[in-house]
Image (cartoon, rainbow, N blue to C red):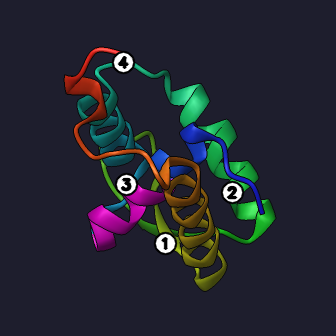
């Protein structure tokens, strides 16, 4: 279960945002964390993939005026998504294992 960095950031955003994980909130969180201005299309495409993989789920909220009759879509992290994030974290820890903590503060 390999996750791209983008997928990890999106899943962590959903987890962080809990019940407020809409595409708008996820995009805002993504932009703040990465300093990049990611397009909504990128969010939607990646969220569709994460849902197909079983790492996230979605549900429609109520229809609101000002949205052209479209409901907000709320995303939720699944147990499979948590497991995939844990595996990604374990891999990173294994990758960095053995290197001293202040390694970037020293000359090579």
Mark 1 or 3: the one toward you = 3
Q: Residue furthest bottom?
A: 79
Would you identify the image quadrant in which residue 57 lies?
bottom right
Instruction: Report if residue 33 is visible in the image.
Output: yes
Q: Residue 32 in the image: state x and y as whole percent.
A: 23, 32
- Residue 41 versus residue 68 in the image, above or below: above
Say few, some or many: other residues with alpha carbon within 10 Å of mark 3 (under 14 / 14 to 19 / 20 or more). many
Would you identify the image quadrant in which residue 51 lies?
bottom right
Q: How far apart, in angstroms, are the residues tagged by discs 1 and 4?
A: 23 Å
Say few, some or many: other residues with alpha carbon within 10 Å of mark 4 (under 14 / 14 to 19 / 20 or more). few
Name the residue tied to disc 2. Answer: 50
Which one is nearer the viewer's eye here, 83 or 61? 83
**Sequence-first disc among 1 and 4:** 4
Name the residue tied to disc 3. Answer: 13
Q: Secondary structure at mark 2?
A: helix
- Residue 2 versus residue 76 in the image, above or below: above
Q: Are marks 1 and 3 in contact (CB under 8 Å)?
A: no
Q: Residue 67 in the image: state x and y as whole percent.
A: 38, 41
Disc number at residue 36?
4
Q: Quadrant of the N terminus?
A: bottom right
Give the residues in magenta: 11-19
Q: Residue furthest front?
A: 108
Instruction: Name the residue rendered at 37%, 46% in the picture.
Output: 26
- 14 left or right of 48 in image: left
């Amino acid at each position: 279960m390999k996750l791209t960095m983008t997928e990890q950031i999106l899943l962590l955003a959903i987890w962080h945002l809990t019940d407020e994980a809409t595409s708008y909130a996820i995009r805002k969180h993504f932009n703040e964390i990465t300093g990049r201005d990611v397009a909504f299309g990128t969010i939607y495409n990646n969220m569709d993939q994460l849902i197909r993989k079983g790492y996230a789920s979605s549900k429609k909220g109520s229809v609101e005026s000002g949205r052209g009759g479209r409901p907000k879509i709320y995303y939720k992290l699944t147990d499979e998504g948590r497991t995939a994030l844990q595996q990604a974290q374990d891999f990173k820890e294994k990758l960095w294992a053995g290197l001293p903590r202040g390694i970037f503060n020293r000359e090579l």
